[in-house]
């Protein structure tokens, strides 16, 4: 199989789930798609080395996550500026979303970036704590602490949403 074919197969097998993962971290599908696309472009530039070193998915996921968090921070700063100075005259305002989903996205955004990333990797991707620690450059203890604090914060904010409670109970 050629290098291009290997990369294409990797992309086809992993891109959709990675977009969903980054979307869960950011709550913004367009930002997630942009971050993931850029991460794959960067992976292609290093494909020979990444493929040689083993599974390239953690590297691509880390790059996409960092790109998305940077974009999220820029958006947050724009929002803060808007709150201070008011919306631009042609700004339509936030788009409407279904209640529970919007509340979940808002609650995830209230978490620190480290907590949000740990929750997404562990609870949405079902990665074990040890793998989350490797991927985030943290200790397993730090990941467990982030998960515990995030679950407490999310639980308080979302106690009335049954789907959240059921999903978290499954993943303990």
Image: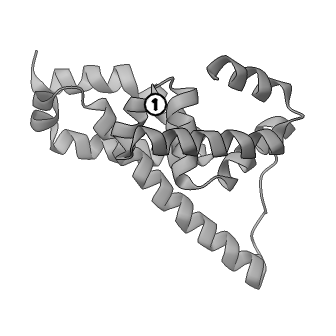
Classed neighbour count for the residue bearing mark 1: other residues with Cα under 10 Å, few (<14), some (14–19), many (≥20): many
Could you tell me which quadrant the N terminus lies in? Answer: top left
The colour scheme applied to this rendered structure is one colour
**Residue positioned 79% across, 62% down in the render:** 93
Look at mark 1 in the image and give the residue it sits on.
129
Which residue, as the protein is rendered here, is positioned at the far bottom? 85
Residue 172 picture location, percent across and down: 64, 23
**Residue positioned 57% across, 28% down in the render:** 124
Which residue, as the protein is rendered here, is positioned at the far front? 141
**Residue positioned 77% across, 37% down in the render:** 101
Label 1 SS? helix
In the picture, residue 86 is in which quadrant? bottom right
Residue 88 visible to the viewer: no
Q: In the image shown, does 7 or 136 lie closer to the viewer? A: 136
**Residue positioned 69% across, 55% down in the render:** 110
**Figure check: 5 above or below 31:** above
Q: In the image shown, does 124 or 60 lie closer to the viewer? A: 124
Q: In the image shown, does 10 or 132 lie closer to the viewer? A: 132
**Figure check: 93 above or below 67:** below
Residue 87 picture location, percent across and down: 76, 76
Residue 69 picture location, percent across and down: 49, 55
Residue 133 picture location, percent across and down: 39, 39
In the picture, residue 77 is in which quadrant? bottom right
Residue 130 visible to the viewer: yes
Q: How many marks?
A: 1
Q: Is residue 84 found left or right of 117 in the rendered image?
A: right
């Amino acid at each position: 199989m050629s290098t291009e074919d290997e990369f294409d197969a990797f992309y086809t097998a992993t891109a959709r789930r990675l977009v969903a993962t980054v979307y869960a971290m950011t709550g913004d599908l367009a930002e997630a798609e942009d971050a993931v696309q850029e991460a794959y472009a960067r992976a292609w530039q290093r494909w020979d080395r990444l493929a040689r070193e083993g599974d390239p998915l953690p590297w691509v996921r880390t790059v996409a996550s960092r790109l998305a968090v940077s974009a999220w921070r820029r958006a947050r700063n724009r929002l803060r500026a808007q709150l201070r100075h008011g919306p631009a005259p042609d700004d339509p305002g936030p788009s409407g979303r279904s209640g529970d989903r919007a509340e979940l996205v808002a609650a995830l955004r209230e978490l620190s970036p480290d907590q949000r990333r740990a929750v997404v990797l562990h609870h949405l991707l079902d990665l074990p704590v040890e793998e989350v620690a490797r991927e985030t450059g943290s200790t397993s203890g730090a990941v467990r602490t982030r998960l515990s604090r995030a679950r407490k914060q999310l639980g308080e904010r979302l106690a009335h949403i049954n789907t959240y409670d059921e999903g978290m109970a499954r993943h303990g």
